[in-house]
Image (cartoon, rainbow, N blue to C red):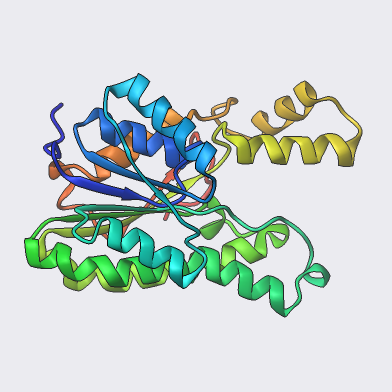
Amino acid sequence: MDLGIQGKKALLAASTSGLGLACATALAREGCIVYINGRDAERLNTAQQHIAHATGVQAILVQADINTPEGREALIQACPDADILINNNAGPPPGTLADWDHAAWISALEANLLAPVLLIRALLPGMRSRRFGRIVNITSAMVKSPRAAMSLSTTARTGLTAFSKAMSFEAAADNVTLNNLLPERIDTPRQAFMAQKMVKEQGIDLAEARRRITQTLAAKRFGTPQEFADACAFLCSAQAGFISGQNLQLDGGSYPGLI
């Protein structure tokens, strides 16, 4: 299927590895002009080489920390007329209520609520004026299935979900969509971190940790970054113009609820 986005400009936050890099690769494959972002120059160059090898597209590099005003401004200045915005950022670590002081909450809100909201604020008006825009926020399955240990992440990302839903009503008339992708147990460095945490806490080896995790999923396997990225690419497509304000879960069918 031709997704109708060849030549569109795609700006991807935190896209040097994991789901962000997978989404950048998928959009490059569809012919987008891809801007990738990260804080580390070496990781940016490695990601650029990965995308070029996979798609033949030379991604444009934006070295910046999106958790700072200066970093966000660097992204906006690099691609002020983005047609596609993929919001992504590392989630805060799991923990307990006693672990989370004021600084921890501010850090989580800055990274997983304010950074994407302020990028949307900057780029949404231009999308609406050009009558095309696709905004996809990579959030978490915990938005719909909160767990105490992930409360920092859940709280911040739920705020982003509400904001995006509110913005989606007005933007839809201008062919601009805002949607959220909710990953769970996708085989990324983040998932590797969680498995290693189990190894340390439960005294098991890595293979057993991964087995135990997959047994909690209906599909009995991890999802792949490519599967996730292909879903992202479709939400960015011309064909997806009638899908907005939605939360699409990529969890191997594991969510137990109806809505």
Q: Position of residue 57 (x, y in %)?
A: 26, 28
User: Measured along the vertical axis of the image, is residue 193 above or below residue 114?
Assistant: above
Outermost right residue: 203
Q: Which residue is drawn at 91% across and 33% down?
A: 203
Outermost bottom residue: 102
Which quarter of the figure is the C terminus placed in? Answer: bottom left
* Front residue of this view, candidates 258 and 222: 222
Q: Position of residue 142 (x, y in %)?
A: 57, 55
- Residue 234 lies left or right of residue 2; in this view the side is right
Q: Where is residue 41 in the image (x, y as percent from the top left)?
A: 51, 43
* Front residue of this view, candidates 92 and 198: 92
- Residue 73 lies left or right of residue 9; in this view the side is right
* Front residue of this view, candidates 199 and 117: 117
User: Measured along the vertical axis of the image, is residue 146 above or below residue 25?
Assistant: below
Q: Where is residue 2 in the image (x, y as percent from the top left)?
A: 13, 29
**Residue 251 seen by the camera:** no
- Residue 50 lies left or right of residue 154; in this view the side is left
Which quarter of the figure is the N terminus placed in? Answer: top left
Q: Which residue is drawn at 57% across and 34% down?
A: 188
Outermost front residue: 41
Q: Which image quadrant is residue 196 in? A: top right
How many badges with numbers are in the image?
0
Q: Residue at x 16, y 62 (%)?
A: 127
- Residue 100 lies left or right of residue 155; in this view the side is right
Q: Which image quadrant is residue 200 in? A: top right
**Residue 122 seen by the camera:** yes
Q: Which image quadrant is residue 162 in? A: bottom left
Q: Residue at x 22, y 58 (%)?
A: 177
